[in-house]
Amino acid sequence: MPSDVAATIDAVYRADWGRIVATLIRHVGDFDLAEECVQEAFAAAVTQWPESGVPDVPRAWIIQTARHKAIDRIRRDGRYREKLTSYVNSGFMRAVEEPDVEEPYYASSEIEDDRLRLIFTCCHPALAPEAQVALTLRTLCGLETDEIARGLLVAPTAMAQRLVRAKRKIRDAGIPYVIPGTKDIAERLDAVLTVIYLVFNEGYAATRGSTLVRTDLCAEAIRLGRLLRALIAPQVPAEVTALVALMLLHDARRGARIDENGEIVTLEEQDRNAWNHAQIAEALPLAEESMRATPGPFAIQAAIAAVHCRAARAEDTDWPEIVRLYGLLECIQPSPIVALNRAVAVAMAEGPRAGLAAIDALTATNDLDDCHLLHAARADLSRRCGMNNEAAKSYARAMELVKNDSERRYLERRLREVQSS
């Protein structure tokens, strides 16, 4: 296959998977059927596009092909006649034996609505919270089961079972594929915010692959956050505003996180002139607004990101304030990762030995041995203390666990540095 065609297919898959699946789910009302037919459509693109050329609107071609494959499957289903009326009413197919093979162009606004419908469907209160998050990451972002399992600290087999049960629940309970009314939005809001945040996190630091950042997922999460905020205006909960601010502040640093060779640049080494200062200026008032009431987890995280973005130089960072904010976050949303981040902040405020002591205290009470971030943090603080042998061991352990190629190259580079010292 020509490299340009392969690159186009990969780009469409990464950027438009969620849009395409969401559109097909709206019509067929079956998550598995939609996903399988979209996968088949991409497989058809791999076979056909090298010969026929890339279509003018690749996403529309995939949607149309997936739709036709779904119709073929529905026809083979013994309950085809029973289901026909619902498919006709949905606009998916016409009440004729042979549906029209021509498919209209799918407008962007329609697809955007489909994605928001998908999130609210996945976050229906009839589903367990952990299933809501997993199902949205699978269908909206196209993440593989093992990627979701790693992000949520669950065994892949357990995650696969969770996804199967969630899809079955939606189908059997007849959960509607709609954006709920104002009253019903409130009970789903926490889950929706969590899902959008996890989508952004996967884009900001991809679980696997050759690049650290998936800009498509970052942009999608920010767009969904803005859309959600507009949907529930004018009485927007502080955590909705906080999440938008948090994502904007993190995303503003994107251009400085990777150098021209695709290598990671740490926060303290980044060229702050390369940050998106217009985006920071937009986000800072939102972060401040979200802290005026009793702050929630996203508000505190946005406040931490704001401290970083206000510092003109790395050495100007108010690390004691960041330690204080992480302590507050740990009180209302305790987790090993929050505690690890606080330990790193302690190291920056009080010195690397204080940070190592905080990490040692953390590992005594939490099983984080399979978390590469823990070993990478311990390695860095050991290096700063001049403990190169200990640093090398921790870098090696982090390299065994990390899945992202950019992060692995960074760890390899650091390991070589301490080994040669």
Image (cartoon, helix red, strand yellow):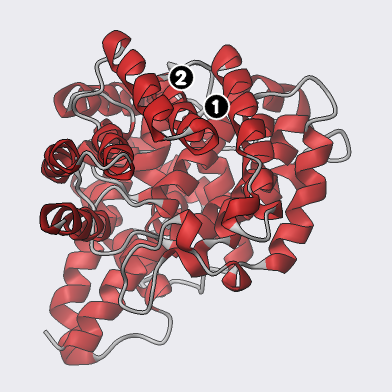
Determine whether the residue tagged by mark 2 lies in a helix, strand or loop. Answer: helix
**From where the camera sits, is residue 72 visible?**
no
Task: Please tell me which residue lies in front, 40 or 163.
Answer: 163
Residue assigned mark 2: 129
Q: Is residue 59 above or below residue 300?
A: below
Q: From the top left corner, tell me how far across and down residue 22 is, in percent.
A: 45, 50
Depicted 342 relative to depicted 335: above or below: below
Q: Give the percent coordinates (x, y) of residue 145.
A: 23, 38
Q: Quadrant of residue 161?
A: top left
Going by the picture, which residue comes out furthest to the top? 365
Q: Nearer the viewer, residue 135 or 195?
A: 195
Tag 1 residue: 191
Q: Is residue 222 left or right of residue 63?
A: right
> Is 218 left, or right, of 407 in this rendering?
right
Q: Residue at x 19, y 58 (%)?
A: 417
- First reached walking from the N terminus: tag 2 or tag 1: 2
Quadrant of the drawing holding the C terminus = bottom left
As drawn, is 175 to the left or to the right of 42? right
Kindly indicate whether the residue at mark 1 contacts the one at mark 2 (C-beta within 8 angstroms): yes
Residue toward you, 285 or 62? 285
Tag 2: residue type? Pro
